[in-house]
Amino acid sequence: MAVEPTQNIDTLLLEERTYPPPPEFAAQANAQASIYDEDFEAFWDREGKERVTWFEPYTELYQWDRPYAKWYLGGTLNVSYNCVDRHVEAGLGGRVAYHWEGEPDGDRRDLTYGDLQKEVAAFANALKELGVKKGTAVAIYMGMIPELPIAMLACTRLGAPHTVVFGGFSADSLSARINDMGCEFVITQDEAWRRGTTVALKKIIDEALQETPGVKGTVVVRRTGNDVPMTEGRDHWYDDVRGSDDPASCPPEPMDAEELLFLMYTSGTTAKPKGIAHTTAGYLVGVATTHRYIFDLKPETDVYWCAADVGWITGHSYIVYGPLCNGATSVMYEGTPDYPDKDRWWSIVERYGVTILYTAPTAIRTHMKWGPEYAQKHDLSSLRLLGSVGEPINPEAWIWYHEHIGGERCPVVDTWWQTETGMIMITPLPGVTTTKPGSATKPFPGVDAAIYSEQGEEVGPGGGGYLVLRRPWPAMLRGIYGDDARYRETYWAKYGDVYFAGDGARVDQDGDFWLMGRVDDVMNVSGHRISTTEVESALVDHKEVAEAAVAARNDAMTGQAIVAFVTLKGGGEGSVEKLEELRNHVATKIGPIAKPANIVFTPELPKTRSGKIMRRLLRDVAEHRPLGDTTTLADPTVVAELQTRGAEEQSRED
Ligand code: WT7
């Protein structure tokens, strides 16, 4: 949904409630108020030295050759060494790294840092034996099993950049990413568990690999144990290729600070996803630092749970790299929150004594809909801090979370960031910040965020506009893989000298930021970015579709929901069957997450005289709003027709 920030300032109700940090929490917090007074360079220099162990120390903090930054220049390090080996060397080999809980009942596994070190060595040796070396690109397509972080760490041990593709993406999405990055190997599993049934990951890989000439081999981890087809010479069961688990047999490769760590693909305003590039040192320092201060991590005593999927940036930064670098004990859960019942999450919090919980507003709203009785069945008194990420959190959900999950004693940190920023950028510090439900509050220390008007002037307190970032930060993206022009165009063309985030925002009299959603043609469904054009091209790919336009409407549960407007070839009429067929087609092309919630079949799309689809109008139809100015339309009668149809089709949603 595109937000017109200037319109919103007047209409948005200001949330008046404030929550100062509880004094006992503030007294023991890792971050105290003085952290905001620190000099930007001194801050990142100290964190660079304290969070990470270097093989060779860096010689220069950063270089800013707009729009590209480099950090910790001259330093060498290894991510798997920092996340695993050094903790074992420090005598912490017995500390649990992950309490892993599978979806099937009773399926549990605790991995200590010592176990993790062995597993990473064994996996890295397997990859090495198959031919993976420094610089070999590897795709990973897995569910939430321990072998997923193990495989990622194994890649980093060898200096092989990875791209993890979320298990909900289709074969087409997968092959596009594999080809764009030039991946030579794919790591996957036979099947994944999801809500009591299996997802055929290996089967989807087989389909994707029809289109990926560059892939030499796969490694397949057994999860469900069901039979899956294996291609001789290409596919390898992990059990057959697993190498020595002696870490000394696979020493961590020293990497230059600026070498590529991974790509994470994310949607933009065109159909082609962007390979967001993150490099080694800045990313690791950025995620470890933010994880420590924002979640107030006490690695000796905390049990931390980020209930996201490792297949998204949230999982990379705050399930894998940040927490492990900090020596945290985390929970990792494979399945859905309602399997076998709606109290599954709360049983996990109780079982492991989770102290810090980080999740998304869409999940909070789902629990809210199910009712607080599921949480009440369990002892949640171990919780001391709650976090939120992915979309603006509505004040009702914030307050429900604070009250029913946090027992009114836990600070709530609403964290704004993006795949591109790699690390949290705007957030409360739990022992310092007075929070307001719905506001992500203040830029993290060292982060220079501001709000600009359309004309590029900074907007003061009380104003609204576009969120920009004016100074580089360590975990900042190093561009879009293989597409410098698109990088400059997407993030830098609007203002020239500052990073344009694509979000509308307001700043209030206290200097607190209120994020208001995307201003481009990017939708946010359940905290996941999906581009309108991507869904449109999936729709027109169907043989019967002549034209398609996609808009988002607000949705009480998922934040936004996708509405598609479709014109069929030869003036064909829509039907419930056709609707299902098209929805499934989108699922095949992109993945189930991109399925339109509903489709409006229409003989014509509203276009300007120059032939441009009037998206604003479609959004109004999708939202059942009165329509604004339609005088620029080539054929104004299209609109009346659309409105009637929009109202009719609404009932067909699932
Ligand atoms: C977009 C980034 C960062 C991990 C999850 C999503 C929206 C994210 C918040 C928040 C308001 C938020 C923004 C942003 N967003 N967190 N706390 N408040 N909006 O990562 O897929 O890269 O999406 O998510 O619109 O630009 P992503």
Image (spheres, rainbow, N blue to C red):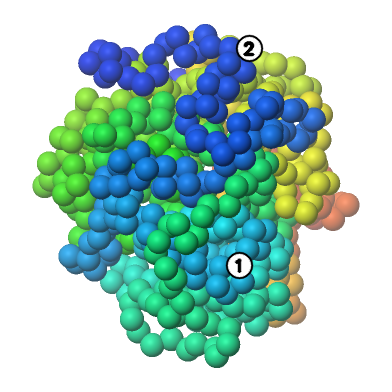
The span from disc 2 to disc 1 (Cα, nearest Å) is 52 Å
**Front-most of residues 398 and 546:** 398
Residue that appears at 53% across and 21% down? 46
Identified by mark 1, the residue type is Val
Instruction: Report crowding for label 2: few under 14, some 14 to 19, many 20 or more residues within 10 A (C-alpha).
Output: some
Residue to which mark 1 is pinned: 132
How many numbered dots are placed on residues in this image? Answer: 2
Specify the farthest residue to the right: 610
Q: Earlier in the sequence, mark 2 or mark 1?
A: 1
Say what secondary structure mark 1 lies in. loop
Q: Quadrant of residue 516?
A: top right
The residue depicted at 76 percent of the width and 44 percent of the height is 487
Q: Is residue 296 above or below residue 570?
A: above
Give the percent coordinates (x, y) of residue 518: 61, 39
Q: In the rendering, which numbered label is found on residue 460?
A: 2
Q: Amino acid at mark 2?
A: Gly
In the displayed structure, 321 sits above or below 650; it is above
- Asked if residue 422 lies left or right of residue 471, the reply is left
How far across and how far down the image is residue 645, in percent? 58, 61
Q: Is residue 348 left or right of residue 234?
A: left
Q: Nearer the viewer, residue 78 or 496?
A: 78
Against 31, residue 149 (above or below) is: below
Note whether residue 155 is visible: yes
Image quadrant containing the N terminus:
top right
Residue sitting nearer the eye, 511 or 210: 210
